[in-house]
Image (tube, rainbow, N blue to C red):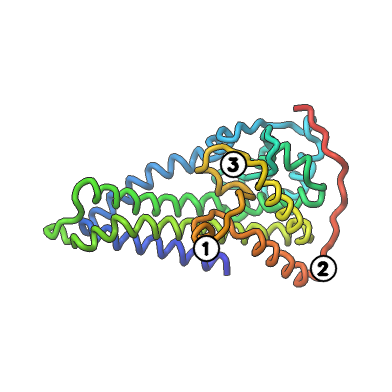
């Protein structure tokens, strides 16, 4: 269902792009804008791992420096059937984590010092499983496609604004062009955020099935939301969709433009999944984490 919803939202984005192109200058305008956006976003996606890690000043750690963390990532990766990603630590008191990389063969997982200090081992395992599910599902590719199409819509709308909208000689409607300038980018942003929220639900479910312990991730999400109210990770806002938890937002409009679903909704789905799986299967507990970084 999540995959179908994601594909439907991507198709809707594409439909908006075609409509904007026709309204402004016909299909040639849409094609040119799509090519330009694809070139810019492809470069961003190809180097997404380096850019995201640099944005949060993540540092690589070896198995000798963080043996328990490395061991947990390795076990989960083997269980998920993907190559073990590179492991990074963000030297921040904020409790958060993210995964990045264009595919499972070029992936990295990063956790903050704050999340390692705050979460019990089984809850941190749930968080890591969530990030590995993003890698397995190739969500970075999905987000890149969404960003490409949404970027083309925004670019065409900006060009229409600067150059006075569409021309009838090119098959465009001036009224449609004006509507596209203001409405299309807003609609594209809402849809793009909807895709991001859908992928978060899918990663939560993937983590729950990977660990067999949905409640551990649900408890972790509760802790992370409480922590996010007081300690923010900072960094470039463009990379917030990668984080497992953003600051809490209230109200319909705030949630509409949020990159993540409401924590209560995520917890409710995880607890429902726990019943489906027949209760929480407690994983083996792991001792405290040793760091020499």
Q: Nearer the viewer, mark 2 or mark 3?
A: 2
Camera-side residue: 291 or 109?
Answer: 291
What residue is disc 2 on? 279
Q: Is residue 282 left or right of residue 144?
A: right
Neighbourhood count class around disc 3 (C-alpha, 10 Å): few under 14, some 14–19, many 20 upward: some
Label 2 close to label 1 by CB (< 8 Å): no
Of labels 2 and 1, earlier in sequence is: 1
Q: Position of residue 53 (x, y in %)?
A: 59, 36
The residue sitting at 48% across, 43% down in the picture is 45
Q: Position of residue 132 (x, y in %)?
A: 67, 50
| Residue 228 in sight from this viewpoint | yes
Residue furthest to the left: 169
Mark 1–mark 3 Cα distance, whole angstroms, equals 37 Å
Compared with 287, 123 (above or below) is: below
Under tag 2, what secondary structure?
Answer: loop
What residue is disc 1 on? 252
What residue is disc 3 on? 106
Neighbourhood count class around disc 2 (C-alpha, 10 Å): few under 14, some 14–19, many 20 upward: some
Mark 2–mark 3 Cα distance, whole angstroms, equals 35 Å
Neighbourhood count class around disc 1 (C-alpha, 10 Å): few under 14, some 14–19, many 20 upward: few
Q: Is residue 255 left or right of residue 160?
A: right
> How many numbered marks does the figure carry?
3
Camera-side residue: 162 or 253?
Answer: 253
Q: Is residue 79 left or right of residue 52?
A: right
Of labels 1 and 3, earlier in sequence is: 3
Marking on residue 267: none
| Residue 81 in sight from this viewpoint | no
């Amino acid at each position: 269902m999540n995959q179908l919803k994601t594909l439907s939202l991507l198709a809707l984005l594409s439909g908006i792009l075609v409509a904007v192109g026709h309204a402004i200058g016909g299909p040639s305008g849409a094609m040119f804008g799509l090519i330009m956006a694809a070139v810019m976003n492809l470069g961003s996606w190809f180097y997404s791992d380096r850019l995201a890690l640099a944005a949060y000043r993540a540092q690589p750690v070896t198995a000798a420096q963080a043996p328990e963390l490395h061991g947990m990532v390795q076990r989960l990766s083997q269980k998920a059937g993907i190559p073990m990603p590179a492991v990074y630590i963000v030297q921040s008191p904020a409790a958060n984590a993210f995964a990045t990389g264009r595919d499972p063969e070029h992936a990295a997982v990063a956790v903050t010092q704050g999340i390692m200090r705050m979460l019990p081992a089984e809850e941190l395992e749930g968080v890591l499983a969530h990030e590995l599910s993003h890698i397995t599902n190739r969500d970075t590719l999905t987000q890149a496609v969404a960003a490409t199409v949404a970027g083309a819509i925004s670019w065409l709308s900006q060009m229409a604004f600067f150059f006075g909208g569409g021309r009838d000689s090119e098959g465009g409607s001036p009224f449609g062009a004006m509507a596209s300038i203001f409405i299309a980018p807003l609609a594209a942003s809402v849809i793009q955020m909807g895709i991001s929220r859908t992928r978060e639900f899918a990663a939560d479910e993937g983590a729950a099935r990977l660990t067999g312990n949905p409640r551990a991730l649900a408890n972790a999400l509760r802790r992370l939301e409480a922590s996010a109210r007081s300690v923010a990770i900072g960094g470039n806002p463009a990379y917030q969709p990668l984080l497992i938890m953003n600051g809490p937002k209230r109200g319909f409009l705030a949630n509409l433009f949020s990159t993540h679903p409401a924590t209560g909704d995520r917890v409710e789905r995880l607890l429902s999944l726990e019943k489906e799986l027949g209760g929480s299967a407690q994983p083996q507990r792991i001792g405290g984490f040793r760091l020499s970084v």
